[in-house]
Amino acid sequence: MTTTHPTAAPELWLASGSPRRRELLEQAGFLIAGRARPPRAVDESLAAQETGEQAAVRLARAKLEAALDDPALPQVAVLLAADTLVVAPEGRPMGKPRDAADAVRMLASLSGQWHQITTAVVIGTGDQCRETAVTSRLRLAELTRAEIRAYVATGEPLDKAGGYGLQGRAGSFVEAIEGDCSAVVGLPLAATRRLLAAFGIRPAWMDRTRHDNENQQ
């Protein structure tokens, strides 16, 4: 008689070091098994003529591919990578500032302006991959030069696309948002939940509820 063994359940692993993305996933009820340690860094420079969506998707794919090379990654791992870019009013994608002067320049160009924020999410294993990109619009208040310089001096803008983070001190700069608020801070939760479900990963509370309902039948 042949003995069958149950298939190991998929595990969610992050190909992202963003504490905010991890926090959003955990708040939604997802259990995170670990974080991949890519053996190589990803070049996050932007290519000429790329749109914000094209650049965000390309960078998220590159992060996923680098993380798949982590020798400690278990076979059951399903990796999640993401990238967020701000798109200037004239349509030019903006990554993270190179230095404080670049952060000042970015914020001055966005001050008082509507602009786009695109977050791409790529989820996959060594065998399959799914991806999506979500774009929202945001308007910053008119900022004085002194306000911009004081904010940049905190150091917060240096690792934020466009030179600011909605979830940090710059939250008071934001006058209006159109679109997915979770995408603006780094991870579109509704779209991400749909992608993860395709790999058999659901929020823990959802699986518990389904299990309880099955036991009652």
Image (cartoon, rainbow, N blue to C red):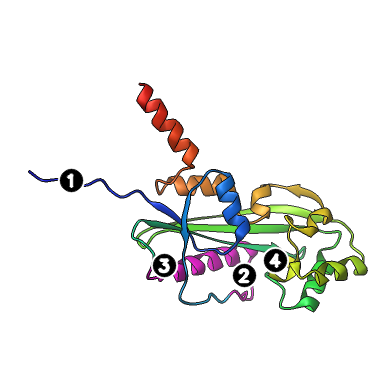
Label 1, on which residue?
Answer: 4
The residues tagged by marks 4 and 1 sit, at their Cα atoms, a distance apart of 49 Å
CB under 8 Å between discs 2 and 3: no
Taking the spot 59% from the left edge, 64% from the top edge, the residue there is 56
Taking the spot 69% from the left edge, 58% from the top edge, the residue there is 117
Q: Position of residue 141 (x, y in %)?
A: 86, 56
Of the residues shown, which amino acid type is indicated by label 2? Answer: Glu
Q: Position of residue 91 (x, y in %)?
A: 72, 65
Q: Nearer the viewer, mark 2 or mark 3?
A: 3
Of the residues shown, which amino acid type is indicated by label 4? Answer: Lys
- 73 in the magenta segment: no
Question: Which comes before the other along the chain, label 4 or label 1?
Answer: 1
Question: Which comes before the other along the chain, label 2 or label 3?
Answer: 2
Q: Is residue 107 above or below residue 40?
A: above
Question: Which comes before the other along the chain, label 2 or label 1?
Answer: 1
CB under 8 Å between discs 2 and 1: no
Question: Which comes before the other along the chain, label 3 or label 4?
Answer: 3
Label 4, on which residue?
Answer: 160
Q: Nearer the viewer, mark 4 or mark 1?
A: 1
CB under 8 Å between discs 1 and 3: no
Q: How many C-alpha atoms fall within 10 Å of the one at disc 3: few (<14), some, or many (≥20)?
A: many
Q: Position of residue 102 (x, y in %)?
A: 77, 76
Q: Which mark is residue 50?
A: 2
